[in-house]
Each structure stands twice: as structure tokens, then as C-alpha cells.
Amino acid sequence: MRRTPPFLSLVVLLGLSSLTAQDIASFEKRITVKKLSNGLTLMVLERPEAPVFSFFTYVDAGDVQDPKGKGGLAHMFEHMAFKGTDKIGTLNFPAEKAALEKVEQRFQEYERERLRRVDRDPKKLEAAEKAWRDAIAEAQKYVIPNEFSEIIESAGGEDINASTSMDATHYFYSLPSNRLELWAYLESERMLHPVFREFYIERDVVHEERRMRTDSSPLGRLVEEFLAASFIAHPYHENGIGFPSELDAFSASDASRFFEKYYVAPNMVIAVAGDVKATEATPIMERYFGRLPKMEKPEDLSTVEPPQKAERVTTLREASQPYFLEGYHRPSYLDPDDAVYDVISDLLSSGRTSRLYRALVRDKKIAVSASGFSGFPGVKYPNLFAFFSIPAQGHTPAEIRDAMHTEINRLVTEDVTDDELKMVKTRMRADLVRGLADNEGLAEELATYQTLFGDWREMFRSVDRVDKVTKADIRRVAAKTFVANNRTISTLETKVPAQPPKGAQQ
């Protein structure tokens, strides 16, 4: 969680009623937005408080863009983006390129044998696998491991990272201000000339991520079952990291095709925030990122989740702590009621004064945590308003369900109080301010809002929309959303190990 500097805390305390108009005007003086002829959008925010800057690259493609049968490919390319280029990470690129082409040829031969349904020859399969792995070892001789990241670190780079969500892929780190041109070169090079070296080695790393995040995690397995039950058509039903069989099947060639389709200039927004001057930074960024070819933005998803017609319930029974998870379908972030869902989420879940904490944790003492949150597992397409709780020792998911539904029904049958609504709105304004407290947060918020709305100013206008939410809005939205036939419930019940029969030998 980002810490709020003292001066920002003072702003919160003095009141934020004029935040929107005042801050849009203030930021407009310091923000430069330029859409290049190739379609890529650049943003520069001048913030000369320390001699550093942060950037945030927002690629408008995430897990939902994974090709059918190739789940986890977007996440896999995120890993590949740190493997270098034709100039970085290699001892001899012409020789490495030929070796990598051989790896792909051998992999395709191995896959044909592995996927053969009849007349599979175990000896041929073994030989094909050995030839493929030998080709990988040969290609590895040309690799300089981690050179891309080491260049950044040697230049003073910090917090080098990336993330893949259902909706998008993000790249970010921070550097001293005098390294702006180095950053622009590196970031544009990996979008221009990525090399899919060490692909199958890294694929094993993703396998291990899958094992830790899902296969060996009771909560991970519960979420996977929950999403699969909640969405029957839309790719939000995928788990994001892919299933083991999918991870085994996709290739470096698949990753290359994914890159060529989605990592195109009009599908990216790059924001820089920190001690940089737009008059100096923008020409540098334009020179490097303008090299990306002009291409069409890829088509959006056409699949729409059909309305849910009946309650869906899944139950896992394992020797694990119990969990309770349920969700209700809601529209995307572009819906006019999006701010109402945000208010409901804050009302139910923000801190120890929230309704769910007070009811389930403090008063009834049947849970150790309880929350309700909007926008799961993404926001770009119609998604879920979800509720999650961990039952206290000796209590069951069924008790949580009943208590949770009591609180949800209160939203439909009773108006929230004036004090509650005022507190929620004040807190949400303060959250916006906290998000603008550092270069990293600013770059992320600017790139995100520019991508989702086409205008970074929506970051501040969202406060206006929250301010306009009424008690009647909360009851209306709750009444149309939190209904049984729109609900999916997934629980993990503790499975008690069977006791041996009396008299049986221990």
C-alpha cells in the first residue's frame, strides 16, 4: 500500500469538495499527451520533486485474448519481454536465430508424436523429445542470461516488474531522470525486436507458478471452480495462467504470433511521471517509439456472457481451512451505474467500520475476514460483484452465506444512513489523492484511464460520479443485481479425515 505524504493528508483533512475542477486544471498544466502517427499514445507528467521518473506501459491485451486452447499465452509473453532483443542477451544473434528456428522445428515434430492418438511409437516419441531438448541446449549456448534487466539495474533502475491481468498487460520500473533516453531505447527495442529465447525453460517456470498458485492452493482451486461456474461463454471463465495441458502445448511460435497481433502501436499507452520536462522528453520518446510500425488496432472480443438463469453452486471438500465465495453478474466499467457499484463495495468492505466486518467479524464473530468487491476478475467486460469470507474456527460457509445474504438484503430494503454515505464519498476522494502520491501511482493511473476512457481526466471525473450517487441509487442497483438467479456460490468445506474403525490396529 502506498503511504500518503503529510501534505496530502492535510489536503484530505481540509476537505476535497473542489478536487475535480481544481485538479484537472492543475494537471492540465503539467501533462502532455501525444498520439503518434503510428497510433501509440505517449503521456508525460512533470513532477520535479526528486531526480527520478517512473513509467507505465499499458498493453490493451490480457488473459482474455489467449487463443483457444492456448491459455496462459498472454502471461507467457510477459515473461518473454524480459529476455532481451536481437542486440541484448545474445553472444551471436545470427547463430542464435538459426538455433531457435531449429528448436521450433524439433518442437513441432515432438508435438506431432506426442498428440498422436493411434499408432503412437514410444521410441519415436522419445527420440523426438531428445532431439527437441538437444536443440534447446544448443540454442542456450548463445544466451547472456538476464542481460536486459541487468542493464536497467546498472543504470539505477528499481522495481523492475510486469503484470498480466484478464484485461491488460503492464510493464513498469523507475530510473534516474538522466536515464530517460536509455529507457526509451530499451522499452521500444523490446517492443520492436523481442527474441523468444529460453522460451521452453521459462514455460517450466510458469508451470511452477501454476502449481503454487492453483494446484497446491485450496483457495486457488476454489477460485478456478468459481470462475468456471460463473462464466459459461466469456473468457473471464479462464484461470489466466492456463491449464497444464495448454502450457505443454503452446510454443514460441504461438507467442510470436500473439505479439505480432496485440503488441502494436495503437494498442499501447505509455505514461512517464517524474522529474522530466515534456519539451525534452516528448521528442526523445517520439523518436524511439515512433519506430514502431503503423498497424491496425486488433479487433475486440465479440463474445458476450448470456444472462444467468439460475443460481449455480460448486462445493470443494478438502482437508483445508474453509472459504466462502459468491458473485453476481454486473455490467462493465462503462455502465452508468459503475460508480454505484464502487460505493456499495466501499460501504461493505472498507476497513473495520464497514458493514461486513462489523456484522460478521466484530458482532457475530463467525468470520475472521469478510469483504465485497466489484470488478472481478476484470472490469473491461461485464464482470462480477463478489463476496469473500474466511469462517472463524468452528463456523461453516453455510453460516457465512446466511449472514452475508442478510447484509446484502439490507441494501435492498433499507436506505444507507446519511453518515455512511458521506463517509464513503470522503474516503473514496481520499483514495484518489493517495493514488496520486508518487510517480509510480501517477503513471499507472494516467495510462489506465487514458486507455479505458480515452481521456485521463476521467480519473478526476470519477469523483463527480461518486458524489452524485444517492441512497435510492444504492437500493435500485442492489435490487437488480443481488438476486438468486444471478448468483454463483462456491464454498470450500473442511473435509475431516476418516477415523479408523474401533479396534482397528493403529
Image (cartoon, rainbow, N blue to C red):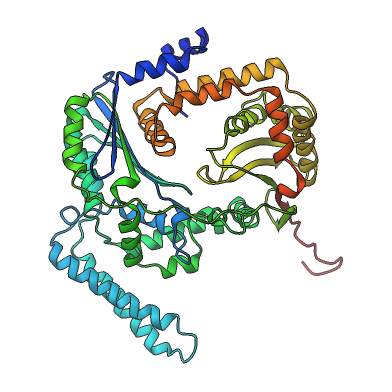
For image coordinates 34% across by 47% down, the residue present is 267
Residue 194 vs residue 216, the one in the foreground = 194
Q: Is residue 151 visible?
A: no
For image coordinates 46% across by 20% down, the residue present is 433
Q: Residue furthest bottom?
A: 119
- Would you identify the image quadrant in which residue 456 lies? top left
Q: Residue furthest top?
A: 14
User: Could you tell whether 415 is left or right of 78 in the image?
Assistant: right
Residue 96 vs residue 123, the one in the foreground = 96
For image coordinates 56% across by 59% down, the residue present is 215
Residue 423: % across, % down:
63, 17
Indicate whether 173 appears above or below 323.
above
Residue 279: % across, % down:
18, 25
Indicate whether 42 appears above or below 295.
above
- Would you identify the image quadrant in which residue 134 lies? bottom left
Residue 466: % across, % down:
57, 24
Q: Is residue 61 visible?
A: yes
Residue 318: % across, % down:
69, 57
